């Protein structure tokens, strides 16, 4: 699709949306500013760089597509390439297991910004923000499937210290990049079967979290309260989870809720999937572009008219407008948005990924 075709489509779309009271340029500007946190672990199959070997704790990738990032430098290079094909404000979401020890004998309960300084430097060079995750899995100090709720005090202490260190590292990320750093505390704690004393383990977990969050840290730099929601965007297929997100009805409804209700800064969007059966960079691009596209489609919806029909009690008009929304030329606006950012529109990005695969990924053995 050439520039002239894209512009013509955009002009038509702009007129069509204007008839419904939607300012297309404002919609683009609004969603362009909403950060989407792209997860680092898609690029290397959640292996990380601690040298701990195979994943444990129920984390598993499927597939063996060639080109997996084997080093932090390779992962940064791949993520940087992917981000050039993704519009809008994009952050990188790091797990603590992506520490670079560089020969230092240090474990997760002792990590400092030193193990992540290369990530911070890279983020600054690329003008992006970082988010962070403690890694409460794949470690000898796991008590079966328990970490912060473990009844083994030595193991619980280890994970409490890990949680504290991650907040401190996140604060450094925020200070150095000039962008807030959200810390996603995801713990796998629990039994595979019915627990007999749920209160006991919840109390232990609560005590652990209270200790982790005891230190006062500026919430503008490291959000740490429920006034913000960390959105975990993934896709399940039957019993399996963490597939590349597609632009389906579920994703669109999620983004509709964010945009329709003005939660642009209250909901922090993070992606989470890992697929080793396809090109990993393509997986990043497809999923992250879909998330951004769904935000744009939400911003283009004539929600003002739809809500007014509801207030007026005209439920016929409400349903009719909801259905007519599906026929509006939102795709033409999306293609123009991509072009305005200097990003390949349509499927033109795929050729660039294929070239990168041939010249870079295929040489990794």
Image (cartoon, rainbow, N blue to C red):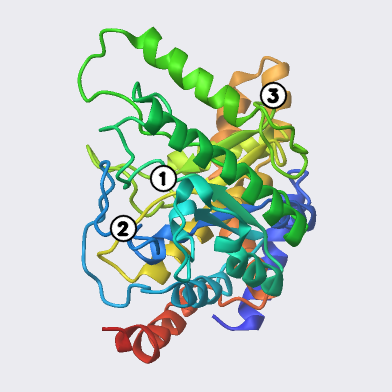
Q: Give the CA distance from mark 2 to mark 3.
A: 58 Å
Evaluate whether residue 324 shows in this view: yes
Q: Quadrant of residue 221?
A: top right
Q: Is residue 47 above or below residue 243?
A: below
Residue highlighted by disc 2 = 52
Quadrant containing the C terminus is bottom left
Residue 80 position, x and y percent, is 55, 74
Residue 88 position, x and y percent, is 66, 62
Q: Residue at x 46, y 56 (%)?
A: 106
Q: Give the CA distance from mark 3 to mark 1.
A: 33 Å
Q: Residues within 10 Å of mark 3 (few under 14, many from 20)?
A: some
Between 117 and 23, the one lying in front of the other is 117
Judged from the image, the secondary structure of the residue bearing numbered disc 3 is helix
Q: Between label 1 and label 2, give the one nearer the viewer.
A: 2
Q: Residue at x 73, y 17 (%)?
A: 312
Residue highlighted by disc 3 = 309
Sooner in the amino-acid sequence: mark 2 or mark 3? 2
Image disc number at residue 13 = none
Residue 258 position, x and y percent, is 63, 37
Q: Give the CA distance from mark 1 to mark 2.
A: 26 Å
Between 33 and 105, the one lying in front of the other is 105
Residue highlighted by disc 1 = 234
């Amino acid at each position: 699709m050439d520039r002239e075709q894209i512009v013509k489509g955009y002009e038509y779309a702009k007129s069509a949306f204007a008839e419904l009271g939607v300012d297309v340029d404002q919609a683009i500007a609004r969603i362009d500013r909403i950060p989407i946190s792209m997860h680092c672990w898609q690029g290397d199959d959640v292996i990380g760089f601690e040298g701990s070997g195979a994943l444990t704790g129920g984390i598993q990738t499927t597939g063996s597509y060639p080109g997996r990032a084997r080093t932090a430098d390779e992962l940064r290079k791949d993520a940087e390439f992917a981000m050039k094909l993704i519009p809008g404000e994009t952050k990188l979401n790091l797990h603590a297991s992506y520490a670079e020890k560089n020969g230092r004998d240090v474990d997760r309960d002792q990590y400092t910004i030193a193990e992540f300084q290369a990530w911070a430097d890279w983020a600054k060079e690329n003008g992006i923000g970082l988010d962070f995750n403690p890694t409460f899995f794949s470690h000898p100090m796991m008590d079966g499937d328990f970490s912060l709720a473990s009844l083994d005090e030595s193991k619980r202490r280890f994970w409490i210290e890990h949680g504290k260190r991650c907040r401190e590292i996140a604060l450094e990320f925020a200070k150095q990049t000039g962008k807030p750093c959200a810390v996603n505390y995801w713990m796998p704690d629990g039994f595979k079967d019915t627990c007999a004393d749920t209160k006991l383990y919840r109390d232990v977990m609560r005590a652990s979290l209270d200790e982790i969050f005891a230190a006062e840290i500026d919430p503008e730099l490291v959000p740490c309260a429920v006034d913000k929601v960390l959105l975990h965007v993934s896709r399940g297929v039957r019993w399996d989870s963490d597939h590349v997100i597609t632009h389906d009805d579920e994703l669109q409804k999620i983004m509709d809720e964010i945009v329709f209700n003005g939660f642009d800064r209250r909901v922090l969007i993070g992606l989470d999937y890992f697929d080793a059966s396809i090109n990993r960079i393509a997986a990043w691009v497809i999923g992250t572009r879909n998330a951004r596209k769904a935000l744009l489609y939400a911003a283009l919806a004539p929600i003002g008219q739809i809500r007014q029909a509801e207030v007026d009690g005209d439920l016929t008009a409400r349903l009719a407008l909801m259905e007519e929304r599906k026929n509006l030329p939102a795709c033409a606006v999306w293609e123009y948005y991509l072009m305005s950012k200097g990003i390949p529109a349509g499927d033109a990005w795929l050729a660039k990924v294929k070239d990168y695969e041939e010249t870079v990924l295929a040489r990794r053995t």
